[in-house]
Image (cartoon, helix red, strand yellow):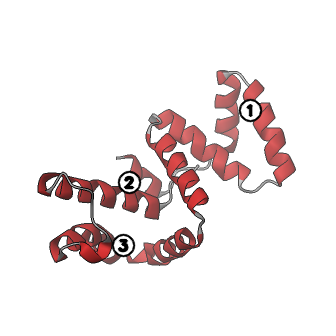
Amino acid sequence: MKVPVLRILALGLVFAAGQAFAQASPAPLPAWDKLTPQQREALIAPVRDRWNREPEDRARMLERAQRWQAMTPEQRAQARHGMKRFEDMNPDQRREARALYGHMKALTPEQRDALREQWKKMTPAQREAWMRDNARPPRDRDRRQER
């Protein structure tokens, strides 16, 4: 399972905004139109900085933003839940999740179901062997996210 950059950015923005607003007021947070210019800047700056710092990722960032906008509220909730699960994993679990995701992405729905059933029956040693045989090396972006 690969963590989309946009979701990571969104969480960072939510965290940064929460920190900024927590000190300002205990009242409910306002709609975007009611934010001060400073509050908007606190939300936008991390995305702008990443956009400028990593031009090779711009197309991916834009595609993910467009895909996020096209999601239903249920799909967004499901994505947030998956991201939270991934964040709570230790590095070995993340490596395992990435290997599984990368492998399953290329399978048909029937093959995915069969692999899920097979995975449930595997011992930890068998899973480790499967990962050695099927895991792809992490990309630079994946290593940056682990830090």
Q: Residue at x 34, y 47 (%)?
A: 147
| Image point (53%, 68%), residue name | 68
Residue closest to the eye, 89 or 127: 89
Displayed quadrant of residue 70: bottom right
Which quarter of the figure has residue 95?
top right
Contact between labelled residues 3 and 1, with CB atoms less than 8 Å apart: no
In this picture, residue 143 sits left or right of residue 72: left
Residue 75 in the figure: left or right of residue 106: left
Residue with the most extreme left position: 24
Residue tagged 2: 144
- Reply above or below: 109 against 5: above
Q: Amino acid at mark 1?
A: Trp
What residue is drawn where x is 45% and y is 59%? 7
x%, y% of residue 13?
31, 61
In this rendering, does residue 31 appear at all? yes
**Label 1 to label 2: alpha-carbon separation:** 28 Å
- Which mark is nearer the camera, 1 or 3? 1
90 displayed left or right of 15: right
| Disc 1/disc 3 C-alpha distance (Å) | 37 Å
Q: Tell me the SS state at disc 2.
A: helix
The label number, if any, that marks residue 119 in the structure image: 1
Residue 8 or residue 129, whichever sits in front:
8
In this picture, is 70 found above or below 131? Answer: below
**Disc number at residue 137?**
none
Label 1: which secondary element: helix
Say which residue label 3 marks: 54
Residue 141, quarter of picture? bottom left
Query: Residue drawn 36% across and 72% down?
Result: 54
- Work out whether 53 lies above or below 20: below
x, y percent for residue 143: 42, 51
Few, some or many residues within 10 Å of mark 2 (<14, 14–19, 20+): few
Q: Position of residue 51 (x, y in %)?
A: 35, 75
